[in-house]
Image (cartoon, helix red, strand yellow):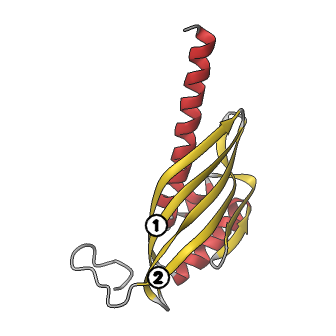
Amino acid sequence: MNLETLAARLEALESRAAIESLISAYANAFDRLDPDLLRTIWHADAVLDLPGFGEGAGPEGIVAMAHNSWRKMPHMHHWMANPLIRIEGDVATATVAADCLFHDIEKGPVQVSGLYHDCFERRDGQWLFTKRRFELHFLTPLENWKPIAGSETFGGI
């Protein structure tokens, strides 16, 4: 194997790791109600589109949209799975399955499942989201659901 091939393989692995970290940071930012972390994963012209939940443009618009979501759903837990990532130079796309448990202040505990459609770009050597759109598969109220162990701060349940 020559050095060019090895360098290309290393770049592909580093890009994939950076994109997977962005996907994880998104879930952690929403679950921990962390606007500072959420702000760091978007390019200035990025868009987050969560049909039925809100839309935001640019890091500050996305954080503002998140604050609205956090008021309505003060507890969130995202599981991100099966990232199918395609990288072509400095542009990448991905689909990511999501299963989420939310405590909605009006509906109570709900399970939300769907698929994220993502776009990323590497600018000035840094991968960040340019677009993230959620495709809702289902939202299911979890009637009579109560945790029997865990944090007492779990959304006031």
Mark 2 vs 1, N-terminal side: 1
Camera-nearest residue between 10 and 71: 10
Q: Residue at x 56, y 16 (%)?
A: 6
> In the picture, residue 87 is in which quadrant?
top right
Q: Is residue 90 visible?
A: yes
Q: Residue at x 52, y 38 (%)?
A: 17
Going by the numbered disc 2, the residue's amino acid type is Thr
**Which residue extends farthest left?**
149
* Residue 121 rendering spot, x and y as whole percentages: 71, 43
Q: Residue at x 67, y 74 (%)?
A: 51
Q: Is residue 32 visible?
A: no
**Which residue extends farthest top?**
2
Q: Residue at x 71, y 68 (%)?
A: 56
Describe the element under mark 1 as helix, strand or loop.
strand
Describe the element under mark 2 as helix, strand or loop.
strand
Disc 1: CA contacts within 10 A as few (<14), some (14-19) or many (>=20): some
Cα–Cα span, label 2 and label 1: 11 Å
Going by the numbered disc 1, the residue's amino acid type is Asp
Q: Which residue is mark 1?
A: 99
* In-image side of 59 versus 116 (left or right): right
Disc 2: CA contacts within 10 A as few (<14), some (14-19) or many (>=20): few
* Residue 151 rendering spot, x and y as whole percentages: 28, 73
Q: Which residue is mark 2?
A: 140
* In-image side of 10 versus 118 (left or right): left
* Residue 84 rendering spot, x and y as whole percentages: 56, 47
